[in-house]
Amino acid sequence: TQAGLRKKIEELEQRRIILNENAVQLRKKGARTFLTSPLRWRSIHAEANRLKIEIAGLQSSMAQISSLESELRNLPWLVAQQARLLQSRLQEVSEILSRLKQAGLMGDTYEKAGVTASQIRASLARIPAQFFESDAASIQSETNKESVSFVHEILSANQLAVDELLNQLKSWDAAVSEAQAKVAEMSRTLGELQQAISHLPSQLDISEERSGVRQLEVIAQNLEASATRMEVETIPLVCTESERIIQSAAEQLALIQRSLSEVSLLEALQSELSTG
């Protein structure tokens, strides 16, 4: 205990004082004493140094015990703060689950995450309300060792599960946002392609290109529908296929723009020839 350590330090300090006094007495007797009693000098100094080190170690232990006692006194409030933090993170889990559901995420993997969240929520519901609602003074005075231990056990059992679930959901949330952005970009690029085709001269034969664009549109429609009811496992596929359509549409659009440029040059040349 802290009192026991303090007593031990006082005893060692007293022994060190006696050794220092002996050293002073020997020093007063001058060099002759040092020459005739070198082993005694070395013994005194060695013992003094050893006591100094031991005292420093005991003082460090006292500081650690004091810190531990302070933590133990504040343990009810510390546990309450941990409970509130875990509750906050679980609330974030619920918000992301809801947002993903609104985005159309579905399937066994998503449902399993929801079940896990419900199980954790049920476990935290066993924690007395005062750990979430009362102030520090009330919790310190009104809780007991058994209730604090009970709450700490619940928190320890669910902490890792909440952290893993929250990180997983954040990853899915980011992936869904990316997929939605890709699908939106795909639709926008196809719209630009369709507009460019509508401005092509009627005499220009692009039947093959039109057929290719129609195929892209069919695939795009399927992807747009898929994006509203994705499963966790299909998110990467939606992103990959949308990117492929974007690239193909961009290539077609660049080809049409070159064709329009060539038609304009040809029309300009014909106009010069006819007026020449």
Image (cartoon, helix red, strand yellow):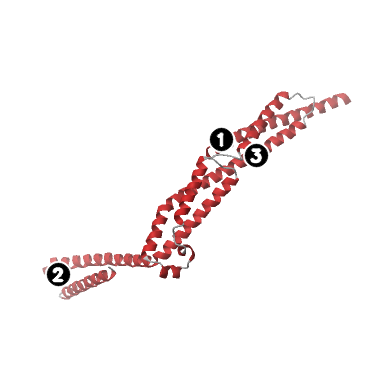
Indicate whether 34 appears above or below 255: below
Q: Earlier in the sequence, mark 2 or mark 1?
A: 2
Q: Residues within 10 Å of mark 1 (few under 14, many from 20)?
A: some
Residue beneath disc 3 = 185
Residue beneath disc 2 = 34
Cα distance, mark 3 to mark 1? 16 Å
Q: Position of residue 203 (x, y in %)?
A: 79, 24
Image quadrant containing the N terminus: bottom left
| Residue located farthest toward the right when viewing the structure as drawn | 275
User: Does residue 276 appear in the picture of this structure?
Assistant: no
Q: Position of residue 25 (x, y in %)?
A: 17, 75
Q: Earlier in the sequence, mark 3 or mark 2?
A: 2
Dot 2 amino acid type: Phe
Q: Is residue 51 left or right of residue 165?
A: left
Cα distance, mark 2 to mark 1? 88 Å
User: Does residue 15 appear in the picture of this structure?
Assistant: yes
Cα distance, mark 3 to mark 2? 92 Å
Q: Are marks 2 and 1 in contact (CB under 8 Å)?
A: no
Q: Residue visible at 39% across and 64% down? A: 75
- Front one among 40 and 56: 56
